[in-house]
Amino acid sequence: MKKGKHLFTGKAKTVYETDDPQRLILLFRNDTSAFDGEKVERLERKGATNNKFNAFIMQKLEAAGVATHFDRLLSENESLVKRLDMIPVECVVRNISAGSLSKRLGVKEGEDLNPPVFEFFLKNDPLHDPMINEYHIRAFGWATDGEVEVMQKMTFSTNEVLKKLFADAGLLLVDFKLEFGRFDGKLVLGDEFTPDGCRLWDARTREKMDKDRFRRDLGGVVEAYEEVARRLGVPLD
C-alpha cells in the first residue's frame, strides 16, 4: 500500500491518503496531549505501543461482531484503515465515576455505576467537546435517529466485550470514548481504542494505568501503557 499525501494532523496521529481512495494510513506519533492541547509532550515508544494496542483491541472487537475501520498493521507506528465519513460525535460509556462526570455532578471518584452511564459529546476542541444529546444531533443533522441507535448499541456491545477482556487481565475499564463513521452505507467504529482514550485501573490497587498519569503528572505513562498491553497479551516486540 503506497502512502499518499498528508491529509490531517491530530493531537497524537497523522492521517495519510493511499493509492486506494477507500483506505487511509494512520501514523501513531509519540506526541501526548491533555486539556485540549494545552499540555503537550513527546514520550518515546508511545506511538508504537498505541498502534499495536489499537490493532489488538480492534481485532478483538471484530471477532466479537463489532465492525471497525481497522484493516491491518503496516509498521511499528502505522496502520491501514478504511476511509470513513466521520460523525462529529463522541460516545462515552462510564462504568465507574471519574473525570468530568465526578466534577460535573460532585460525585466521588471510584463509585460503581449500575447501569453504566452513556453520554454524547460534540467533537470540537475549541469548544472543549461540550456534552450534547439526541436532540442536538437530530437538530443539527450530525447523524440520523437510526445511526444514533446503532452507535449506542455498538458502544454498549464494545463495553461488554472489553470489560471482560480487561477484567481477565486484572484491570477495571472505568470509562472510554468511541467515534463512528460511515463506510459503504453502514456505521463502523473509527479512530482508535488505546489508553489515550479510556481509563484503566489496576483491579486490586486501583492504580491509574492510562493517560491520567500524564494529566496528573504521575509519571511512567508509556510504562503503564506497556504493562496493560503485556497483561492483555499484545505483541509489542
Image (cartoon, rainbow, N blue to C red):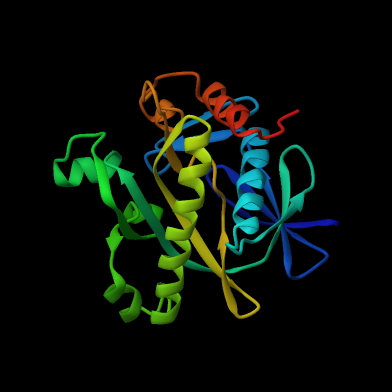
Residue 195 visible in the picture: no
Could you tell me which quadrant the C terminus lies in?
top right
Q: Quadrant of residue 47?
A: top right
Point out residue 222 in the picture as x, y percentages from the top left corner: 56, 25
From the viewer's perspective, tell me whether residue 11 is left or right of residue 202: right
For this orientation, the residue located farthest to the left is 106
Q: Is residue 219 above or below residue 214?
A: above
For this orientation, the residue located farthest to the right is 2
In the image shown, does 232 or 181 lie closer to the viewer? 232
Q: Quadrant of residue 29?
A: top right
From the viewer's perspective, tell me whether residue 233 is left or right of residue 199: right
Q: Is residue 224 above or below residue 186?
A: above
From the viewer's perspective, tell me whether residue 55 is left or right of residue 124: right
| Residue at the image position 61 percent from the left and 68 percent from the top | 84
| Residue at the image position 60 percent from the left and 63 percent from the top | 65
Point out residue 133 in the picture as x, y percentages from the top left corner: 28, 68
Point out residue 87 in the picture as x, y percentages from the top left corner: 48, 68
Q: How many marks?
A: 0
Residue 25 visible in the picture: yes
In the image shown, does 173 or 4 lie closer to the viewer? 173
| Residue at the image position 66 percent from the left and 41 percent from the top | 51
Point out residue 43 in the picture as x, y percentages from the top left corner: 58, 26
| Residue at the image position 45 percent from the left and 18 percent from the top | 219
Could you tell me which quadrant the N terminus lies in?
bottom right
Q: Is residue 66 above or below residue 32?
A: below
Q: Is residue 50 above or below residue 123?
A: above
